[in-house]
Amino acid sequence: MSKHGKVLVAMSGGIDSTVTAMLLHEEGYEVVGITMKTWDYANSGGSKKETGCCSLDSINDAREVAVMMGFHHFIVDIREEFGDYVIDNFVDEYLAGRTPNPCVLCNTHIKWNSLLKRADALDCEFIATGHYAKIKHENERYFIQKSADLNKDQSYVLWGLSQECMARSRFPLGGMTKPEVRQLAADLGYEELSKKAESFEICFVPDNDYRGFLKRRVPELEGQVAGGNFVTTSGEIIGKHQGYPFYTIGQRKGLGMAFGQPMFVTEIKPDTNTVVLGTSDELIRNGMNVGQVNNHKYATIPSDLELVTKIRYKDPGALSTMVQTGDHVAVNFMANVKGVAPGQSAVFYEGDDVVGGGIIYGGHKFGEN
């Protein structure tokens, strides 16, 4: 019998998940590896060569590690489930004038559910991934904490995990830095793996061109939305755009026109195919509404707390106060914040602890509803 129990490890073939499996194996867990195929690159229509977690090479790399270390490895095809939920949501959100975060949605509704389902079938008490984050249990609550490597910290994309998911999850890399992970792989004899490059793209958009993906996914889209108006915040028409789904809040480059001064996308109006442009100052928001909130550290967010709110993955965050009503949170920023984008995730931190997170419904200035 294993020392710590049986754990199902999500293995992409990359360095992080491989070292995760190695560490758990060395700690005395009975490791079972699983690789989930979520997407066919051929179906994306992009020009980039197939690489990353769903490629045949990556699947073979994961299996090779399992064979070398002597534990079972399974490949699970979840392409239909992934496509129906994550990709359809991705397209629908852009068509609604919002900016989706598919990695958060995938973690919350696809990967963890799939892992727990297979873990139960294989009698595994735990699941593990190569995420750079920590899990803490305190006052009968489980919550995510930032990793030791703040440059690699992935706590932001894990706000949607349920209490059950966190109770059964293990993140062995949470206390390590990326250079330490690479060195460990090299020390264990995986020199080539230790030098393997990382991918930062959305897995089903391998050429990193989401606009091209939308056009291929919805062929009639371009003809329906091209030629809408660019307008100022006062309503003045100042040009024509290529279609509202192809723009995001805060965007400055790629507008296709010169305006004599830097102009940014401040609002997207899908009903009229209108993209509102404004100056940098017109991007400022003093607060926002957040829905679909999932609480981590507290059952309800205390209204007397001052928390740091991140509105995007690499956002340093802004000091905020908030009031929670059900799964909705009204956030007031204590400093001006730019680029609040509906559809993106807002994550609330108390120090290194994730208090909760949700989906941004919209930003506002003081005096606005």
Image (cartoon, rainbow, N blue to C red):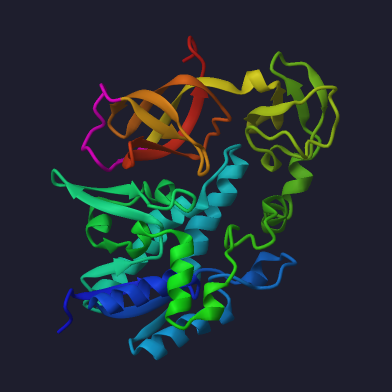
Taken as a whole, is the magenta stretch helix, strand or loop? loop
102 or 227: which is nearer to us?
Answer: 102
From this viewpoint, which residue is outermost toward the top? Answer: 367
Q: Is residue 331 left or right of residue 50?
A: left
167 or 335: which is nearer to us?
Answer: 335
Residue span colored magenta = 292-305
Q: Is residue 122 left or right of residue 49?
A: left
78 or 149: which is nearer to us?
Answer: 149
- Kindly tell me whether residue 78 is visible in this rendering: no
Task: Give how far across and how far down residue 94 sits, in percent.
Answer: 61, 43
Q: Is residue 162 above or below residue 111?
A: above
Task: Give how far across and how far down residue 184 sits, in percent.
Answer: 42, 72
Q: Residue sitting at 57 percent across and 72 percent down?
A: 195
Q: Residue sitting at 60 percent across and 68 percent down?
A: 197
Number of marks in picture: 0
Task: Give how far across and how far down residue 310 sits, in percent.
Answer: 45, 36
317 or 222: which is nearer to us?
Answer: 317
Q: Residue sitting at 39 percent across and 82 percent down?
A: 74
- Kindly tell me whether residue 100 is visible in this rendering: yes
Q: Is residue 193 above or below residue 367?
A: below
Quarter of the rendering occupied by the N terminus: bottom left
Tell me the quarter of the picture where residue 260 sits. Answer: top right
Q: Is residue 315 above or below residue 45?
A: above
Task: Give how far across and how far down residue 366 sits, in percent.
Answer: 48, 12
In magenta stretch: residue 113: no
